[in-house]
Image: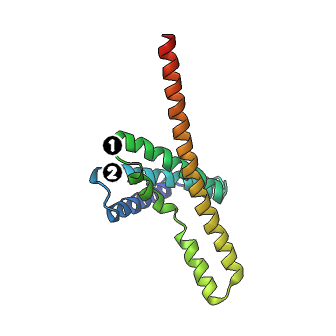
Amino acid sequence: MSWENLLIQFILSYVSTVCFGILLHIPLKAYNASGIIGGGVWVIYWIMYYHQHVGLAISNLFAAILISLFSMMAARHLKMPMIVFNVPALVPFVPGGQAYKMVRNFAIGNYHLVTVYFYQVIVIVGAITLGFGLGELIIRAFNYLHRVLSKTSKLNG
């Protein structure tokens, strides 16, 4: 694991996130935050999957949870909807390469490779979906606990 490689990974995923944000016409002041979220989470995913060998599902799940949490923090800080940051930051994780390979192998008759790539697509998409849901659950639980604890401290104080 070299720092140069991680820096290149960050820069490329930052650029892809910002470019997708441009395509979606997100507000100008959200470009940098969404790029940092997309690039930073991609580097964490890269380290987990390629260097720590955590696994495809867990790496994508953790990345999606982080995207959800960081997007909520950016949304509150910049007073924008959370989806402005979620969707562009998700772009580096979309399993487009696996989906392409699946369709290509289906067309040429390699049905064994079709099942391999189909499995990867399903695992990645499922992990991202579950991660966004868990991230939202963590945010709501934290907000609930914060509200309850602040009420009890006002009653006791």
Q: CA distance from mark 2 to mark 1?
A: 8 Å
- Residue at screen point 40% across, 59% down: 17
Q: Position of residue 74 (x, y in %)?
A: 39, 44
**Viewer-side residue, 35 vs 75:** 75
Q: Quadrant of the N terminus?
A: bottom right
The residue labelled by disc 2 is: 30
Given residues 45 and 27, the one toward you in this image is 27
Residue type at the position of mark 1? Leu
Q: Residue at x 54, y 51 (%)?
A: 132
Left/right placement of residue 25 relative to residue 144 reads: left
Does any portion of residue 56 appear in the rendered image? Answer: yes
Kind of residue indicated by mark 2: Ala
- Asked if the residue under mark 1 is in contact with the one under mark 2, i.e. CB atoms within 8 Å, the reply is yes
Residue 1 in view here: no
Residue toward you, 48 or 84: 84
Percent coordinates x, y for residue 136 in the rendering: 53, 45
- Going by the picture, which residue comes out furthest to the right? 112
All told, the count of numbered labels is 2
Asked if residue 92 lies left or right of residue 34, the reply is right
Residue 78: give its label: 1
SS at badge 1? helix
Query: Between disc 2 and disc 1, whose residue precedes?
Result: 2
26 over 33 or under it: above or below: below
Callout 1: 10 Å neighbours few (<14), some, many (20+)? few
Can you give x and y, in whole percent of width and height, for residue 156 in the image?
51, 11
Where is 103 relative to 108, above or below? above
Q: Is residue 62 left or right of residue 83?
A: right
